[in-house]
Image (cartoon, rainbow, N blue to C red):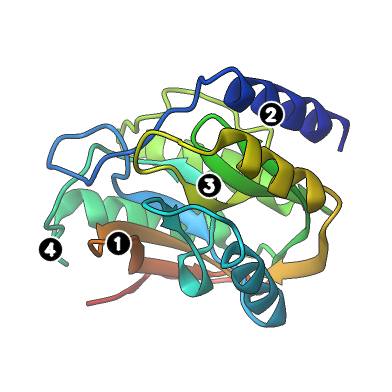
Amino acid sequence: MSDFVEFRARGRAALLAGEATHDLPMVDGATRWGAAAVLRPEGEIVDRMTELAATVSAPGHWVHGGRTLHVTLRTLEPYRTHIPQDDPLRRAYGAALAEAADGLPPAEVRLAGVSPHRGGVLVGAHPQDDTLDTLRKRFAHALESRRVRDLEHGRVRDLWYVSLVHFAAPLTNPRELVEWCDTHADADFGTIGLPAAEIVQFLHTGEGIRVHSLESAALDGGGGASPRPHS
């Protein structure tokens, strides 16, 4: 939690100093919002985060909720509008994810703490076991064994989170947004098991983001995991 407190302080300072950044609708070849490996929470916790996100004053920005909420395991490639089911990279991602997830239990995370940052607002995802870190390492190794390079180039994720808002235009109300985050800084949504990992594609709906699942692998503690392609 101490690292998250420091992250929150840096985010507040950046927004109050007018240093917000923002995303643009995706185009082919962009380095943001390409296919990624993620884990999506389910159940009542998702409903509560969705309800909270709906109360933030963020006109013109991408406010997330429901099945859009996710923890990113790894960013994989530049943005592609079309990723067919028989795409070689998609198949490699799915096989690597299944190998990485094999035998692992659901990843236990505590979803708590609302923080602003340069590009939006997030909720901290604090691991309660080693599953996320083990999955991250295994997935990196499985990609490397298939000679697949991703956009992270060895980056080690040591801060996990679920984004509630991505800024999609210049931020016009930084102080109001920071005050909203301060009000909810101690929000605690509880602990949840993340039951699956997925390869997903992000799609711009015109007003926000939709998450489309391409491949998935269960985290159920069993052996013999295999990728489950989605249409």
Within 10 Å of the Cα at label 1, are there few (<14), some (14-19), or many (20+) other Cα atoms? few
Say what secondary structure mark 2 lies in. helix
Residue of label 1: 207
Determine contact: label 4, label 2, CB under 8 Å: no
> Which one is in front in this view, the residue at disc 1 or the one at disc 4?
1
For the residues labelled 3 and 4, the Cα–Cα distance comes to 22 Å
What's the amino acid at mark 2?
Answer: Arg
Measured from the top left, where is residue 11 in percent x and y? 65, 28
Which of pointers 3 and 4 lies earlier in the amino acid sequence?
3
Residue 130 seen from this side: no
Q: Are marks 1 and 2 in contact (CB under 8 Å)?
A: no
Rounded to the nearest angstrom, the CA distance separating label 4 from label 2 is 41 Å
Q: Which residue is mark 3?
A: 73
* Residue tagged 4: 84
Left or right side of 136 for 81: left
Dot 1 and dot 4 residues touching (CB under 8 Å):
no
Amino acid at circle 1: Glu
The answer to which of marks 1 and 4 sits earlier in the sequence is 4
Quarter of image, res 83: bottom left
Quarter of the image with the N terminus is top right
Residue 167 visible in the displayed image: yes
In front: label 4 or label 2: 2
Q: Which residue is mark 2?
A: 12
Where, by quadrant of the figure, is residue 77 drawn? top left
Give how far across and how far down residue 34 sits, in percent.
29, 44
